[in-house]
Amino acid sequence: MRVWALPLALLALVACVTQSVAHRHAATAPPTVPMRAAAVDPAQLARRLAAIQPGWPRSRRFDCGRVKCVALTFDDGPGEHTGRLLDLLKQRDVRATFFVIGQMVAADKGGHTVRRIVQEGHEIGNHSWSHPALAGLSDEGVHRELQHTQDIVRRLTGVRMRVMRPPYGSTDAHVARETRREGLAQILWNVDTLDWRDRVPAKVIRRAATATPGSIVLMHDIHPTTVQAVPRVLDALGGKGFTFVTISELYGRPPVPGRMYTER
């Protein structure tokens, strides 16, 4: 293959469609998950893509001290509805932050969705391996939950995540200590759409629309009703003059490891 054709060939491989599977949480410690054999080794592909696009994921520059910025965040995926959400965000040229669960990444055969999240310029964050309340775990338990997810995302995408979200917002001093060791900032929220409880698009839209400059909005890409609400959420906030940014863009730089953030 000619050298100039390599990037096109690799990007075509990344675009291969695979089937998502249902979301499930596990209460046990995260196991080591072997990767399925494939025609192209995912780790090798991630290294080549990283070489083509150094500094991945790409970031834009915003002065969110002067511009009305809002960060839309989506938890618990990737799931069967994440692809549709990515389509909607791409149509509007909107970037968001996805806090992924390691087990869901492992279940997404071939890592197609997680690679697409990164390739399309979204930020990706660690939401643990199996979605436990981290404050109830030992230091070693917190380390395992974070490290397993760090490892699989880096293996598939070449990206080392810099932000995390503790499941249920469950955090304490020892969670802060472990996230600092892992180089991860703790990202919470100040606008909760409660889309996991009230799976009614109109309610999700109404709550998201309460965002103020610097807000971090919590949603979940595993619920079809949330994905259905997203276009009107974008209309409502866009109509108020908001600029949609990732978490790192909201702060202008990667947030400080271990520190907890709820808004700008």
Image (spheres, helix red, strand yellow):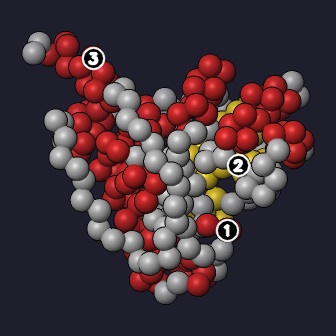
- Is 82 situated above or below 258? above
Note whether residue 256 is visible: no
- Which quadrant of the view contains residue 65? top right
- Is 168 situated above or below 154? below
| 169 lies left or right of 113 | right
Measured as percent of width and height from the top left, residue 137 is found at: 53, 84
Label 1 secondary element? helix
| 171 lies left or right of 31 | right
- Lower position in the chain sequence, tag 1 or tag 2: 1
* Image point (66%, 21%), residue name: 92
According to the picture, the residue beneath numbered tag 2 turns out to be: 219
| 154 lies left or right of 119 | left
Category of crowding for the residue at label 2, using alpha-carbon neighbours closer than 10 angstroms: few (below 14), some (14–19), many (at least 20): many
According to the picture, the residue beneath numbered tag 3 turns out to be: 8
- Is 20 situated above or below 144? above
Please, what is the three-letter code of the amino acid marked with disc 1? Tyr
Please state, as top left, top right, bottom left or bottom right, where the N terminus lies in the image. Answer: top left
Q: Which of 249 and 98 is in front in this view?
A: 98
- Lower position in the chain sequence, tag 2 or tag 3: 3
Q: Which of 146 and 254 is in front in this view?
A: 146
Label 3 secondary element? helix
* Image point (42%, 83%), residue name: 140
Category of crowding for the residue at label 3, using alpha-carbon neighbours closer than 10 angstroms: few (below 14), some (14–19), many (at least 20): few
* Image point (61%, 67%), residue name: 167
According to the picture, the residue beneath numbered tag 1 turns out to be: 168
Please, what is the three-letter code of the amino acid marked with disc 2? Met
Please, what is the three-letter code of the amino acid marked with disc 3? Leu
